Image (cartoon, rainbow, N blue to C red):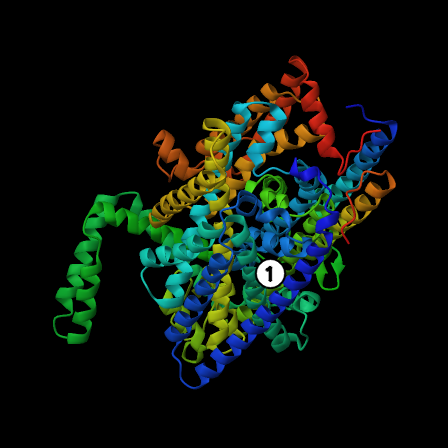
Amino acid sequence: MATFDSHSLEAKSQKAFTAQLKKVYGFYTGGFLLFVVLLGIAEQMGLSRAGIGYVFLGATVLLYAGIGIMSRTNDADEYYVAGRRVPAVFNGMATGADWMSAASFIGMAGGLYLQGYSGLAFIMGWTGGYVLVALFLAPFLRKFGQFTIPDFLGARFGGTMPRLIGVAIAILCSFVYVVAQIYGVGLITTRLTGVSFEIGVFLGLTGILVCSFLGGMKAVTWTQVAQYIILIIAYMIPVVWLSVKQTGFPIPQLVYGQQLVKVTELEKKINADPKELEVRQIFKDRSAAATEKLKDVPASFAADKAAAEAKVAAAKADPAALAAAEAALAKFPADEKAYTAALNKEKGVAARASPPRPHAALYPGKDQAAKDIARKNFLALILCLMVGTAALPHILMRFYTTPSVREARNSVTWSLFFIFLLYFTAPALAVLVKFVMYNDIVGSSFASLPAWVANWAAVDATLLSISDVNKDGIVQLAEITIGQDIVVLATPEIAGLPYVVSGMVAAGGLAAALSTADGLLLTMANALSHDVYYKTIDPNAPVSRRVMLSKTMLLIVAVLAALVAQQAPADILFLVAAAFSLAAAGFFPALVLGIFWKRTTGIAASVGMVAGTSITFYYMTLTQPWLREVFYGIARSVPTTPDLWWDIQPISAGLFGMPVGFAIIIILTLLTPAPSREVQDMVSAVRYPDLKMA
Amino acid sequence: MQLTERHLAYWRALLKRTGLLLAIWFVVTFVVGYYAESLAFDFFGWPFAFWVGAQGALVVYVLIIGYYARTMNQLDREFGVAEAEED
């Protein structure tokens, strides 16, 4: 086996290789900064916003494609595992980019803005999972040293069955995840250039494909390193600037505690403001009126329509009033169905009547029981995200690419360190932006709102909209609706930075989405070509055909994912979380027991994987409104609360699948004969970096 | 393939280390999370449990993995199961 040979001969070349990589990426980082500065100068000289968007989009996608072309290969080791010579630091950066998706880059700080402490489940879950990767998986998988995760399942549990189950789970969770990434790519491309969403999806896809199609893991690795550098610079600059503006100190992570104290004080002040209470009362009344009308739809529909018509008739004399009344009548719902929908929406404004959740409050809830449920779900979500992190094949696969077990261990440290840089900053960004909203925007007059408010409201009203509900000309907090994506996207403008930095942030988001999509697509293509075709159907297939087939699969899977993404499935965030729960319940028990318990048998692992995934998926179909509608035809508006087991939300469905997976594997293992001598020896070999026999 | 007593000792040492680090991981994540409301005392402006979730736990995770990598690489050499030197 290639993994057992000594690397002493290659040692020198590996060292030189690392030194050269450092030089190349050093120049690259300098080049990128210079590019941004030049573009900034061009902006001062009159380059338009759309122009900056096009240059950023074009330059970065060309760059990734260029790396792909330079790394093109048909060699199996190079194509599947980047030649197993990626140094720990660079594998760490690549894993960081692979890991941090559009959701981490754009959505996370916004989620923290909206949810406060509860949002920290994502911060802890998506970092703490690496502890499990380091302790239970990475070094052992590296020692095993094949190409895919199903490879390990096949070798450890004997035969085609475990391998194919592994392929099915890998494809299920990766596909769900990649759809969300491609959707993110489309969204950012649209923002950056103003092309339509469908074209945006396919533009972004081209960037992904040129890279991974030509060079497989090799190209993807070096592109991901380049993407990491762009995304981390793009994330840090605006936050540091905002921190200097607010606190006079350039390390936001250290000083945002004082801003949190100020935000908490502002929350109290806002909650006591009579104007604020007035706006909340208006929303409450509107909701109550809608609820009343919903009790007898036909009667209120007729009455409201008659009232609108009467207004037109009454306004005949005054042309201005007439135009307004006619416009109102034209907008009036055409039939009772549309009318009911409008009323339901109006009823929903009740949400805006309640005070915002205090940022620093721990578990929200009106009584102890509600708080306990919130706490239970918070901890369950953390567990699912952590275990899912340690079971997603596109991440585990990265640890096959290091030169040695030692480097694999170091590489997990670097991976988490590079991820940590961004995750450590996101909570600070959320508080800094919240301070601007509560301190500068709330209480200012509508006439003097900063330009970025109008700019973003014009881009997309769901991102940001402010309307003068009580007509006093002053902004109250309840008059603002804010979407989570705006927090990161608008930070450069909030901080008063030139538009070129906004372009850079969008390019960073694009890098995050593209790099994750690259890794996921490659995982799926490899599972199909390597595990299904080569290992199961035709073990004599020549290398060139295997690689060619992998490339073809990549193309097919990518186009399929893009087509699904264009449908904009109902709930993107749920899809992402579902991928984690499915991977956690499907892979984690089998992988960990396979390494740490020699007795674990193949049949037990197979049944355990299937059972864990099935229970998780079954719970999702029971309790997730969209899936429940698909599977059982129950309308989405019917509350899911009575169907919950132990009050756990569907986002944490893996909480039930994981113990089921573990329990079934353990019980069935004890009931079936122990695995063969060879398999037990293989487990021994995996446990020791170099097993020399006495 | 017969493992020597020394090999088994290596594996026991690894399990012990893994268990200890996992216990730290568990306390930082789940015990602090469970008792968050009792741990809300002021910590440089942050409620303590909030700070742990936003920063403290992350730092501990990085330290756990760094410590594991460092000491396991040493343990490999101690027990003669390290790979050939490369640097």
Query: x%, y% of residue B24?
Result: 77, 44
Side of A85 where A177 appears, left or right = left
Question: What's the chain of the residue with tag 1?
Answer: A
The quarter of the picture where the N terminus of chain B appears is top right
Query: x%, y% of residue A533?
Result: 45, 32
Query: x%, y% of residue A195?
Result: 32, 64
Q: As displayed, is residue B22 above or below residue A68?
A: above
**Can residue A576 be seen by looking at this rendering?**
yes
Amino acid under disc 1: Ala
- Between A352 and A83, the one lying in front of the other is A83
According to the image, label 1 marks what residue?
A426
Quadrant in the picture for residue A556: top left
Side of A393 where A197 appears, left or right = left
**Can residue A356 be seen by looking at this rendering?**
no
SS of the residue at dot 1?
helix
Side of A343 where A694 appears, left or right = right
Which residue shows up at 38% across the image and 78% down it? Answer: A48
- Between A390 and A222, the one lying in front of the other is A222
Query: x%, y% of residue A110?
Result: 52, 59
Mark 1 residue crowding within 10 angstroms, few (<14) / some (14–19) / many (20+): many
- Between A385 and A44, the one lying in front of the other is A44
